[in-house]
Amino acid sequence: MNHEFSVNSPFLYAVTAIILILVMAQATFFLVRAWRQARKLGIDTSKLKSVVKSSAIFTIVPAFSILIGVIALSKKLGIPLPWLRLSVVGAITYETPAAAAAASALGTSIGDTSTLLTASQFTTIAWVMTLGIMASVILPPIIGRGLLNGVGTLEKRDKRWGEILMSALFMGMISAFLGMIFGKVNMGLEGWIPVFVMLASMVIMLLCAVLMKKFKLKWIEDYALPISMIGAMALSIPITNAVNAAIG
């Protein structure tokens, strides 16, 4: 008997739940071991509770941006796959571009919710997202120490060039994402929508920085990313409407 493929299949939910339960069990195991070791070292219980509380807050707040990524991808990929990817090893800055690139190669897009993915399309997108991120899992234990030692040696010889190298690496990473934003500007005013949304996000982030510096609001530092993301997503609607109205 043939069954129509669904990106929200109960089977996918079950597989995702099993993996997440294992990950949570591992985290709980190390949390308990760390707590017991801290008590053996004579660290006060009240101090441990304070550390756990502050760590939980600093973990939950950035998770809002991850939740946004799950919601954005779930329209096309369903909930299980984005939930799994962004909960375990993925990152919103990688998963969304990888999924979008794979979908585009298959003749569809992440924003196209009018057509459903076939099983082969879904599998292809999942493989692209998975294989692409595997390098970040496999390579660090192999080349991580060598890279750190190399950077450390360079900084000892010339601290200025060490800072330049790290800045260049960071800018190179950012440039890879900027290609997606500016990739359609040659298509006319409509192609500038991602650029306008990015600029809106930048303005919101700058406002957060100004508020944090001027009013000494340290807590904004932890909320700045989700605030800028949510704000830019909200502003993307009037921006898109304004551009469409201008096009006529």
Image: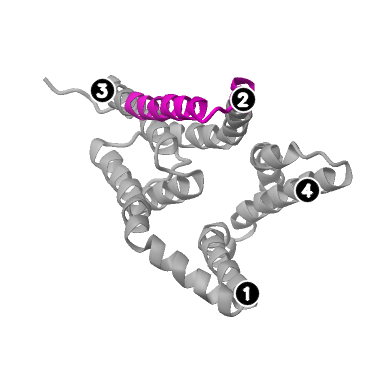
In this rendered view, identify the residue nearer to me: 180 or 66.
Answer: 66
Q: Determine crowd level at label 3: few under 14, some 14-19, many 20+ residues with C-alpha closer than 10 A.
A: few
Real-space CA distance between mark 2 and mark 3, rounded to the nearest whole angstrom: 35 Å
Real-space CA distance between mark 2 and mark 4, rounded to the nearest whole angstrom: 25 Å
The residue that disc 3 covers is 11
Check disc 4 and report its element: helix, strand or loop.
Answer: helix
Q: Answer with mark 2 or mark 1, whichever residue precedes in sequence.
A: 2
In the image: residue 55, left or right of residue 73: right
Q: Answer with mark 1 or mark 4, whichever residue precedes in sequence.
A: 1
Mark 3 touches mark 4? (CB < 8 Å): no
Q: Is residue 106 visible?
A: no
Quarter of the image where the N terminus is located = top left
Real-space CA distance between mark 1 and mark 4, rounded to the nearest whole angstrom: 27 Å
Q: Give percent across and percent down for residue 217.
A: 81, 38
Start-end of magenta stretch? 21-50
Mark 2 touches mark 1? (CB < 8 Å): no
Real-space CA distance between mark 3 and mark 4, rounded to the nearest whole angstrom: 44 Å
